[in-house]
Image: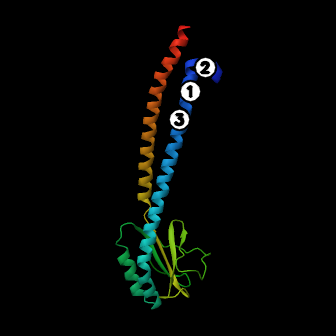
Amino acid sequence: MKIPSFSSLHFATQLRLATLLPVMIIIISFVYLYTAEASYRSQQQRLNESKHYLNQLLPSAEFALSRNNLPIIQKLIQSAATNPDLQLLSIYNAKKELLAFHGKPLKLPANLRNFFSYSQIFIHNNVLISPVFAPGTTHPILGWIAIKLDQNPIQIIYYQHLLLGLFIGFIGLISALIMQTLLSRKILLPIAKL
């Protein structure tokens, strides 16, 4: 079966394609940008929630690691595990050995540096990793704390925005088809009478 070229199509079909193609490109661009922007916003919000939760846990982790008290570390993990969004929480000593965890234990990446500023947090596979220093100092590192919150709310928001974007695009496409049909009648009827 031979695919017809654009010039071999009927004039009405050429007009419809010429007017609908830019509309389709705009609608697809809108849906993509709308969904991508919403996804980025929700990921940033979840990252900020994770950082906030991590900053709440750091003073207790500093206290427990400075005294090398494993029962306090375990109680910290147990009390933090009551958060339903928490997927992973791990506390490590300065040698990156796992002391206590909730969820699936994580092996710390080998490229973590030994000294850096207190505010620096590493992000590794959606897991926030922060050093734990002695209270009031920025070195030596007493240990590490890793946290990961559930990513399902981000996916739900992504799909909600995708469906909303597709619905708006569908409404735009239907509106463009109606407008194009009405306008093409005004153009094609006089030409057909010639």
Q: Which amino acid does label 2 sit on?
A: Leu
Q: Where is residue 185 in the image (x, y as percent from the top left)?
A: 48, 18
Whole-number angstrom distance, CA of label 2 to CA of label 1: 10 Å
Identify the residue at image location x=46%, y=27%.
Answer: 179
Mark 1, secondary structure of its residue: helix
What x and y, as percent, mark residue 40?
50, 57
- Residue assigned mark 3: 24
Asked where in the image residue 11 lies, by quadrant, the reply is: top right
Q: Mark 2 points at which residue?
A: 9
Q: Which residue is drawn at 44% across and 31% down?
A: 175
**Badge 2 vs badge 1, beta-carbon distance below 8 Å:** yes
Q: How far apart are marks 2 and 3 (CA)?
A: 20 Å
Q: What residue type is labelled 3?
A: Met
Q: Position of residue 78 (x, y in %)?
A: 37, 78
Q: For numbered disc 3, what is the local secondary structure? A: helix
- Element type at marker 2? loop
Which residue in the protein does label 1 denote? Answer: 17
Give coordinates of residue 103: x percent, y percent. 43, 71
